[in-house]
Image: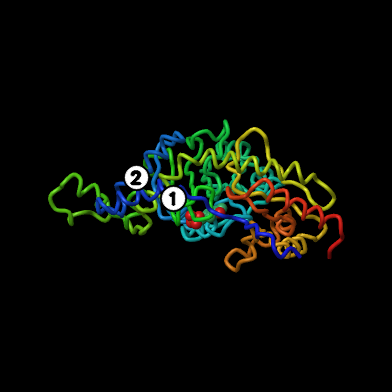
Amino acid sequence: MAEDIAPIKLFVPSFEVDAALIEIKECLEVGWTGAGFKTDLVEKVWKENFGYLNSLFLNSASAALDIALAGLKKLNSWKDGDEILTTPLTFVSTNHAILRANLSPVFCDIDSTLCLDPISVKSRITPKTKALVYVGIGGNLGNFKEIQEICINSGIKLIVDGAHMAGSNSSHYANGKEVDALIHSFQAVKNLPSADAGMLSTPLEELHAYAKKASWLGINLNTFERNQNNRGYKWEYDVEDLGYKYNGNSIMASIVLAQIPFLEKGNERRREIISQYVSELPNNEKITHINRFGEYKTSGHLMQIFVKKGLRNSLMDFLAENKIDTGVHYRLNTHYPMYSYAFGTTPVAELIEKEVISLPLHLKLSDRDVTRVCEKIKEFCGTDVA
Ligand SMILES: *Cc1c(COP(=O)(O)O)cnc(C)c1O
């Protein structure tokens, strides 16, 4: 065992500390830490950067998912129990949002990209299917283009849970206009970290208007706008919907604003690390790489591989003994009681979840660290550790 070697962590967030502090200081000096001010600015910068038509800064991606589902349901008069196609291999936020909107998650299978399999998606469309939630695992787009075509041809809405996808791009996913709702996360260990925040971008003006109100308890005008316009009676607002308290605040927006200019450079480094892993860890009978397609840029949020022959957990133990942290993204949601009705319906996902492992990937990782992880994995593969 390597006593004197520094541990290698799975995720370590990197922050633009000085730039963030300047933005935060401004909030404190002006005396505006809530919604408005920096949240307006971060929405504007986000839209301009990626060409989105509308973006709304919220307190998390989970909040954005809730609002997207509830909003699309209301605006399109979906009924309770209407069906939403989704993946079991995701963080529970994705599927909780469907249930919380009183809609029914219908789980589709995944393929070797770890994202939804278009064939499975097609087979699960019924007259009650209203939307599909697509998760770009690790920032990858998998077979997104085909899925998008299926949604368009079947007249179902497409919601992208892009919690891993800040900066992911491709020609068929250029600027969010091709999807009905696109959600990003700025949670502490995502590839564009704050502490907790998220963004909901949509080309649908009605959904954006609903989301603005719904994120602020259903109140029809936010406090900042009322203050700014110096409108007479500030308390005489209307409450039009049973909304949520999901708005983002100016302190979180400050951190995000400081990070945005460095997103692409950071993602480039992430892709470089992934390439190094792939070249130093050739496929063998125990380790295989997931399918990443060359036609788009991934954000490089995760570095996942498949560990075959039932060796995944013992590899994780072996790496832990060598002070190398690993993770699993994700345990299938169909193991949890509220989704267990669907366990057994996604056989590929059920196989893959036992094989997939996430290796360290963050901006504090050196080339030597990556080599050390690869060496240890090769050492493990060479011996038949049980
Ligand atoms: C992290 C994550 C979320 C939730 O993001 P928060 O900003 O923490 O609410 C949703 N979906 C996926 C796939 C995630 O990884």
In the rendered view, tell whether residue 318 sits above or below residue 231: below
Image coordinates of residue 72 in percent, x first then y, are 44, 48
**Around disc 1, counting alpha carbons within 10 Å, would you say few (fewer than 14), some (14 to 19), or many (20 or more)?**
few
Residue 51 x, y percent position in the rendering? 44, 33
Spatial CA distance of label 1 from label 2 is 34 Å
Q: Residue most toward the front?
A: 4
The residue at which mark 1 appears reads as: 17
Residue 306 vs residue 295: left or right? right
Which amino acid does the dot numbered 2 rest on?
Answer: Ala
117 or 9: which is nearer to us? 9
* Nearer-the-camera pick, 325 or 181: 325
> Could you say which disc has been placed on residue 209 in the image?
2
Residue 34 quadrant: bottom left
Q: Is residue 76 left or right of residue 288?
A: left
Is residue 167 shown above or below 364? above
The quadrant in which residue 143 appears is: top right
Disc nearer the start of the sequence (1/2) = 1
Farthest bottom residue? 337
Residue 301, image x, y percentages? 59, 47
Q: Is residue 114 visible?
A: yes
- The structure residue drawn at horizontal position 63% and vertical position 37%, both measured from the top left corner, is 146
Count of labels shown? 2
